[in-house]
Image: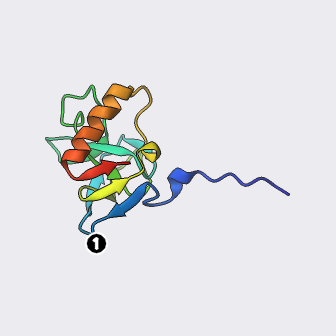
C-alpha cells in the first residue's frame, strides 16, 4: 500500500481553533509580489507605504516588522500581487501550525504572537 504524505499547511484555515462568528475575524488583502510561495498559517506583516501584506519580517523597517494577521489560504506571490483572505482579529489559533520565515528566532516569534494577541488573535 502506498504511503500518502499530506502537507497540513496546504489546507485553508487549518491553523484555526475558533474564530468570531460569520466572517468578522477575516479580511481580504493583497499579498505583495515578491513574497514567494506562502502556505496557510503564514504570519503576515503589512508594508506601511503600500498597505500590501508580506511575510512577517522582524528585521524590517517598513511595517513588515509587526505581525498583523495570518494567511488563511496559501498562494504564490512570487511574480505578481495576489488577493487573499487572512485572519485579522478575534480568533484562537494553533500556534505550532503557524509558519514564519526561515531564521526567525523564538524571541521574534514571541514578539509576533504578542502583536497578534493585541489584535485578538490568541495562540494556543
Q: Residue at x 24, y 59 (%)?
A: 90
Q: Residue furthest left?
A: 49
Instruction: In this rendered view, identify the residue nearer to me: 6 or 36.
Output: 6
Q: Is residue 60 visible?
A: yes
Picture quadrant where residue 66 is located: top left
Q: Is residue 115 above or below residue 39?
A: above
**x then y, percent, for residue 115:** 22, 41
Quick check: 14 left or right of 123? Answer: right
**x then y, percent, for residue 39:** 46, 49
Q: Residue furthest bottom?
A: 22
Instruction: In this rendered view, identify the residue nearer to me: 76 or 117.
Output: 117
Instruction: In this rendered view, identify the residue nearer to me: 55 or 5.
Output: 5
Q: Residue at x 51, y 51 (%)?
A: 9
Residue bearing the label numbered 1:
21
**x then y, percent, for residue 18:** 36, 62
Quick check: 83 left or right of 73? Answer: left
Picture quadrant where residue 46 is located: top left
Quick check: 120 left or right of 42? Answer: left
Q: Residue furthest front?
A: 124
Q: Residue at x 26, y 57 (%)?
A: 29
Secondary structure type for disc 1? loop
Q: Residues within 10 Å of mark 1 (few under 14, many from 20)?
A: few
**x then y, percent, for residue 12:** 45, 61
Q: Is residue 119 above or below residue 62?
A: below
Amino acid at each position: 500500500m502506498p504511503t500518502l504524505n499530506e502537507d497540513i499547511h496546504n489546507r485553508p484555515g487549518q491553523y484555526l481553533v475558533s474564530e468570531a462568528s460569520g466572517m468578522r475575524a477575516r479580511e481580504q488583502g493583497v499579498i505583495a509580489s515578491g513574497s514567494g510561495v506562502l502556505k496557510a498559517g503564514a504570519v503576515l506583516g503589512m508594508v506601511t507605504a503600500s498597505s500590501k501584506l508580506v511575510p512577517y519580517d522582524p528585521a524590517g523597517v517598513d511595517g513588515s516588522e509587526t505581525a498583523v494577521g495570518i494567511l488563511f489560504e496559501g498562494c504564490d506571490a512570487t511574480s505578481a500581487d495576489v488577493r487573499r483572505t487572512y485572519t485579522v482579529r478575534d480568533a484562537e489559533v494553533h500556534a505550532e501550525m503557524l509558519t514564519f520565515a526561515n531564521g526567525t528566532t523564538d524571541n521574534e516569534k514571541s514578539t509576533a504572537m504578542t502583536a497578534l494577541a493585541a489584535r485578538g488573535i490568541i495562540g494556543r
